[in-house]
Amino acid sequence: MNIEKRKSELVKEFTPMLRKSTTTSKIWIGFLIAVILVGMYAFYIQLTKGHEVTGMRDNVVWGIYIINFIFFVCLSYSGAFITGILHFFKTPWKNSVLRIVEIVTVLSIVIGPIFILLCIGRLDRLFYLFMYPRIQSPIIWDVIAISTDLIGCFLYLYLTFIPDFAILRDNGEGTPKWRQKLYKSLALGYQDTDSQRERLHKITKTMATMIIAMAIITYSVLAWIFSLTVQPGWNSTIFAPYFIIGGLYSGISVIIIAMYVIRKFYHLDHYIRKVHFIGAGIILLVISLLFGYFTFTEYFARWFSHKGPDINLLNTLFTKYFWEFIFANYIGVLVPIVILFFKKFRTIKSITFAAVIAILGLYFNRYLIIVPTLETPYLPIQDTRPEFIHYSATWIEWALSFTGIAVFILFFILLMRLVPIIPMSGIIDNERNQKGKFNESTKK
Amino acid sequence: MKNKLFKNFTITLFIGFLFSATSLAQETTVDDYRMKFDFNTFKQADNSRLLEVSFIGTNKKDRKDKAPVFEADIEFYNFLNEQEVKLGVAKTDKEGLAQLTLEENQSYLVDEEGYINLKAVFEGTGELDSEEEEIAVKDLYFELDLEEIDSVKTVLLQVYTLDSIKSKVPVEEIDVIFSVGGMLSKMPIEEASVENGEYEFEFPEGIPGDKDGNIDVFVSLEDHDDFANVIQKKTVNWGVLNKIIETESNTLWSEVAPIWMYVVLTILLVGVWSNYIYSFINLLKIKKEGKELESKNKELS
Amino acid sequence: MDDKNTDKNSNNRRKFLKLGLMSSVSAVAGASIISNLVPEEENISSVEKVRLLTPDGKMVEVDADKINKYPEAYVSPAESRKGIPDRHFVMVIDLARCKNARKCVESCQREHKLDYHEEYMKVQLIQNNEQMEPYWFPKPCFHCDEPPCVTVCPTGATFKRTDGIVLVDNERCIGCKFCVTSCPYSARQFNWGHKDKFDDKSQPYSPETSIPGSEGTIMKCDFCPDMLRQGKLPHCAQSCPMGVIYFGDRNEDIVTNGEETVRFSELINDRGGYRHLEHLGTKPNVYYLPPVNRQFPLERGFDVDEEIIERYKDVPYVKELKKQGKL
């Protein structure tokens, strides 16, 4: 087969996706921008009036912002983890999902720390973190880990983009001038020669190994922010593995949802097939089982050994937060398991539904980890002001949360306009390998 | 119509006056205060004598409202029968205290019974009445000795007055308090009833003292009818060498972290960033190769 | 005709004069009413005034001698990281004598310029279990020897000094609130918004006085090092009418509550002193003497504002009292 001809074919196939701008997408982008504008206004209010406008008060000092931070950063780490692992699988079907996972990784690690910044009282002193760091503090470990991870994920994403930029640059008839220039500069002179390809594969491989290791370490650092304190509900020895499993849980779910949405709106049924959903669904099943197991272990041990502060915490969970608890730890775990366990139920739509339930369940789970512990300290909160006793997020916090999600989706869409969501170089590599295998078998 | 206008006018006027009246009434004058003039004397550890007057007004209606008299001139005299010797003048400070310190070698007029008669006078002004108070005090001497007798740490005290020929006259019965000096206050270690001018007791065990082991031992007499207030002090190095808390370093909560943290962090960061640099260098190599290829292609075509 | 006119004119003139007189007098009266109704502008400046009598019998208001005698006694944030040498401060709180007079809370609030709800020293009502009666529990910051708050601070804004005191430097704090979540005794508070008192520049900021506060930073009990440097007790210990709070130096083994001065080791050992939540390993420097042989019945402590009694509504004993209608 003529590789060059194949490349131009692929470009022709994917170009509409890069340029298409239907009314639905326009409306959708307009809606996202509207949400973002509301969020900017909310941020402005918080900046001028101070943190009083949030629902956080002296006992629950960490609220929705930290929960969003954990959620997004866990998404990112799980994406990095999955990317790294997938890199070492030689299956052809991994190609379709790869870029989706990587983009989820990078976008979440950009959005997550923004939520932490919203929670910091004195943004004008942020650089003190770099001028006067104390390395005994888990927050400094987190700062180092996230900044390192940010650069690593960007680098890795870029490495996977390079061959596609080269293909787009070489087959750019009819593309606007600015796009041509962009592809040319970003492609770094990659001509798909054997030596270049090999070099690229080499560094991609080392990066992939590194990313897996970094994902695990930085994940644990995030969990240690909580488990290295003495508070009831946080001071648990299995927090780091628990967070990793929880992150993978949400990561897989987001990937499934992204696959479903992209497949639907860009008509990529040929590339994103049911086998992908089944594969992701199996992984989701395994992770749900693990997640349910870890959650049960946590709460069972606390309930059984009935230490005073632990029982106080469990009382809060079962009275004030009863429905959230049921949803997060029962529905959120059991529904995906039931759907994915039986072959009959495994349709694309049902798997996506399970993923949605899983994500919501995980979000509630994170909420139940952070907030109830802060509401049941060792020394009882004896106060009359209701906002100091019970945490309820204000519209500003919710607005900024939805803004974060909107930014995520918006940038996802914009990135899909830059480069096709299915890596073309991956398709070519697969076909090249297949042809090579075919040739080999025929030779014999 | 006229009547209404007139009525409104008078009502406004009346209310206006009421308000002004109430606001005027908020100001207090000196007549609302009852003045208190207290005169006391203290013999210090260096045998100097402090004369102190406290001149404070208390609100008759609200006893918590105190207004000290500021910058009032208080004159101190030592008198004997008709003779008066002016000892000095002092101004009251912002707390209403006027203090005058007289050295050890100050000579006083002493009456037959051995009392020094002291008087503090405030000459009245138009608004404040003049005040005067007299006290009679005998000069008392404390001799404090701290010795180790037969390896027992003992505190010895001699209490005496000096008669006209400067010979020691032991005081028959007097109650004193021995205390040990601390940062914020003195801690009593013994309450003693001194008889015949002599007292001794065993110094308690285990008192740490300051960082060099020095302890300030005080003996004091308060509000005695004859002797007013007297205090004497002596320092001795009997402090039990205590365990002064060492500030640890290289802990989780100190400025400098445990060394192993620095080591682990450096290893991890060096590992990761060297990988980034390696990738970056290889990217540059790819770029170079691409450029070479391009220029070669250009040459060919 | 003319007469009528002049009559009319003079009438008009009279009316005009009367109107003018009345309006001016009512204006004056109105002004005095208004000026008395408008509350006197509060002096934001923190310079305290004392009322003194001059010898001429006049009442005057003069600047109080600033307790800290700035600028000579000013301790900058950098200097405040070193402690008072050779000291290690401890506090002993006698739970047998506390009757919720709340003078400690109020004097601390007054001296640190805190609002009504901001309390560095809190008085809680703790009931250990159903069989025991509750007791009033004054709780300052414990200035632990192994403080979890100092460990987790990313910028070193909170630090432990050689004299045992843990302070907060408002100029270094970035407001991440990690220390608030890691303190097991809930001793730290956060300034959630801007308050006018933060703009008071009459004295330079020192972590030893914690004045003025700063928006978006942490504040907490500081054991009043500015008082200690002058040889005076912290404000809470000074103001307690029952002598509940003892304070002193562990190195010289002496603590005092203003009236009594006793040996710290004797006080702890003879009265069964303990530290709260000892098993957490924070090694606090505030010791408690158990509520044995209480000097006052518990109910004396309910002689406070309704709002304050509401705070304790979850204590089982209080619930019982409410059921019986005694509260």
Image: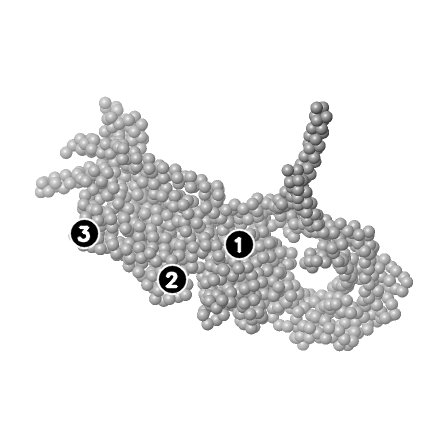
Query: How many numbered marks, from 0 up?
Result: 3
Q: Which of A428 and B187 is in front in this view?
A: B187
Q: Mark 1 Cα within 10 Å, few/some/many (few <14, many 20+)?
A: few
Pointer 1 residue:
C117
- Three-letter code for the amino acid on which mark 2 is drawn: Asn
**Percent x, y of residue A276:** 20, 46
- Three-letter code for the amino acid on which mark 3 is drawn: Phe
Residue at image location 60% in from the left, 50% down from the top: C75
Q: Is residue B81 left or right of residue A270?
A: right
**Percent x, y of residue A384:** 48, 57
Q: Which of B4 and A357 is in front in this view?
A: B4
Q: In which quarter of the image is residue A406?
A: top left
Residue at image location 65% in from the left, 56% down from the top: C230
Q: In this view, does A76 lie to the left or right of C254?
A: left
- Three-letter code for the amino acid on which mark 1 is drawn: His
Q: In this view, does B151 lie to the left or right of B43?
A: left
In the picture, the disc for residue A345 is 3
Q: In this view, does C208 lie above or below B80?
A: above
The quadrant of the image that shows the N terminus of chain C is top right
Q: In this view, does B209 lie above or below A425?
A: below
Q: Residue furthest right?
A: B82
Residue at image location 40% in from the left, 60% down from the top: A232
Instruction: Measure the C-alpha gap from mark 3 to mark 1.
Output: 57 Å
Pointer 2 residue:
A315
Is the residue at mark 2 from the same chain as the one at mark 1? Answer: no
Counting residues from the start of the chain, the first of labels 3 and 2 encountered is: 2
